[in-house]
């Protein structure tokens, strides 16, 4: 619970710092991008705080590049 | 332009030097020594030599489009959609690099200096400073790097001088005892960290006020940084010996524990940690800045600062998710990072350059 409250508090501070200037300057597209990214960020952070498994992109990279790496190191053996 | 700052040539050189030293000063000697043993310094020289080819490639690409960043000209070269995909790929590369750098700081702090502190708190505090730097913009950041540069070099010089009493050149022998292949095996991971990462400077290249001299600055900066790493690697070998150097996660940190002048001046390893914090801060901020700027330019936003806060939050999560433990991290850096970086640091720039040459733009 504390984690969620902390993350939401941080998010609210960030929104208060960012959104007023965006609205004053009528940056509609920027406001949309900010909102979507913020939603993703808060979602991910809460998932992390509740220790839900988030897929690791590094695992994907490893799977993709492992054959090439094996080839190089085999070649240099 | 999203970023209206302009930086000088000397500032750019300093930035490139700090970027090259950052993170690799602590991590690279272990990777080099684990494969190349006492010839690690030859592997380091080989790595720096090969990296000059990459720098030449980035310079060719950068000077061809002197007033556009990587994200802008990939769209200009490849057309709207393919260009957007390529620049988003670059953004993802910079972002993952930033996350791994953040993780490196957390791993170092929790294993060496503050073992009781949760890693999250270190990450959050550090990203706070990075966000401040990124939001201030390129100009204040480079000016800060210029202020810190004499300190970094001074502390390094002090460390090298203080270690001269511990040097034993016999530890370097036998030179080339196991042939050339272990050296190449050692140099391979060293290419990815730090030299292929220099592709990030294509995002900053157009903001240097003289393009012609910026190309030279990239060369000089990489060379100075490379020489620093060669010297540190050589010191780890001739002070600690190849066996001890290969066993450590952070050999240069252990190296600075060896300083002992007249049983009076001892335990100065936090000087090394200080050098490392300063350099990795700038490296991380440059990577984070490049990913924010790249994303903003790809989405055609009017200000890159909009995306910094949410990206910062995502970065903290990614840095925690990215590696379950330090062994996973080190294996990844050693085996996967260079092939992964080759895609972004060599293949994609070559494709961009090739298509630009064919389309004659």
Image: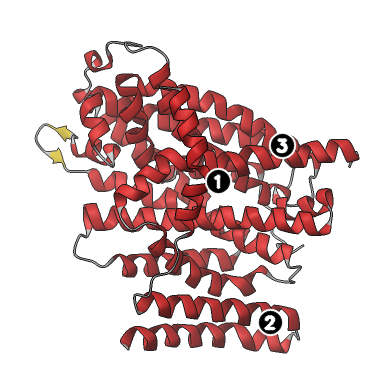
Numbered label attached to residue B15: 1
Kind of element beneath mark 3? helix
Quadrant in which the C terminus of chain B appears = top right
Total number of numbered discs in the rendering? 3
Where residue B185 sits, quadrant-wise, is top left
Q: Nearer the viewer, mark 3 or mark 1?
A: 3
Mark 1 surroundings within 10 Å by alpha-carbon count, few (fewer than 14), some (14 through 19), many (20 or more): many
Instruction: Read off the chain for label 3.
Output: B
* Closer to the camera in the image, B326 or A58: A58
Q: Label 2: which residue?
A: A32
**Residues marked 3 and 2, same chain:** no
Task: Find the distance from the CA under tag 3 to the CA under tag 1.
Answer: 24 Å
The lab-note entry on whether marks 2 and 1 share a chain reads: no
Q: Nearer the viewer, mark 2 or mark 1?
A: 2
| Residue A30 on image: x %, y % | 70, 78
Q: Secondary structure at mark 1?
A: helix
Image coordinates of residue B344 in percent, x first then y, are 62, 44
């Amino acid at each position: 619970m504390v984690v969620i409250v902390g993350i939401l508090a941080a998010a609210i501070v960030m929104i208060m710092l960012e959104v007023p200037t965006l609205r004053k300057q009528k940056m509609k597209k920027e406001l949309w991008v900010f909102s979507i990214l913020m939603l993703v960020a808060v979602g991910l952070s809460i998932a992390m705080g509740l220790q839900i498994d988030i897929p690791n992109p590094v695992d994907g990279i490893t799977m993709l590049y492992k054959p090439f790496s094996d080839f190089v190191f085999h070649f240099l053996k | 332009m999203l970023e209206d700052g302009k930086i000088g040539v000397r500032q750019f050189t300093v930035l490139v030097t700090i970027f090259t030293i950052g993170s690799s000063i602590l991590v690279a000697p272990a990777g080099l020594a684990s494969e190349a043993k006492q010839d690690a310094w030859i592997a380091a020289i080989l790595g720096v030599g090969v990296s000059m080819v990459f720098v030449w490639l980035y310079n060719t690409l950068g000077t061809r489009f002197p007033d556009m960043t990587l994200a802008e000209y990939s769209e200009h070269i490849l057309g709207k959609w393919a260009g957007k995909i390529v620049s988003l790929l670059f953004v993802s590369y910079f972002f993952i690099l930033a996350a791994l750098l953040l993780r490196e700081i957390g791993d170092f702090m929790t294993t060496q200096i503050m073992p009781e502190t949760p890693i999250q708190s270190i990450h959050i505090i550090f990203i706070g400073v990075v966000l401040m730097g990124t939001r201030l913009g390129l100009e204040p950041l480079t000016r800060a790097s210029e202020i810190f540069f004499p300190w970094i070099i001074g502390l390094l010089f002090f460390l090298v001088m203080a270690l001269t009493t511990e040097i034993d050149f016999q530890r370097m022998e036998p030179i080339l005892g196991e042939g050339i292949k272990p050296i190449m095996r050692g140099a391979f991971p060293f290419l990815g960290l730090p030299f292929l990462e220099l592709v990030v400077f294509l995002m900053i290249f157009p903001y240097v006020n003289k393009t012609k001299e910026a190309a030279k600055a990239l060369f000089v900066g990489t060379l100075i940084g490379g020489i620093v790493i060669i010297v540190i690697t050589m010191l780890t070998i001739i002070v600690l010996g190849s066996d001890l150097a290969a066993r450590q996660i952070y050999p240069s940190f252990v190296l600075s524990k060896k300083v002992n002048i007249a049983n009076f001046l001892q335990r100065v390893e936090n000087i090394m940690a200080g050098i490392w914090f300063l350099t990795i801060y700038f490296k991380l901020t440059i990577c984070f800045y490049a990913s924010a700027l790249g994303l903003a330019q790809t989405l055609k936003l009017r200000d890159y600062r909009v995306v910094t806060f949410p990206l910062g939050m995502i970065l903290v999560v990614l840095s925690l998710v990215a590696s379950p433990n330090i062994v996973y991290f080190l294996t990844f850096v050693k085996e996967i990072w260079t092939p992964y970086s080759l895609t972004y640091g060599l293949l994609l720039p070559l494709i961009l350059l090739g298509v630009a040459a064919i389309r004659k733009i």
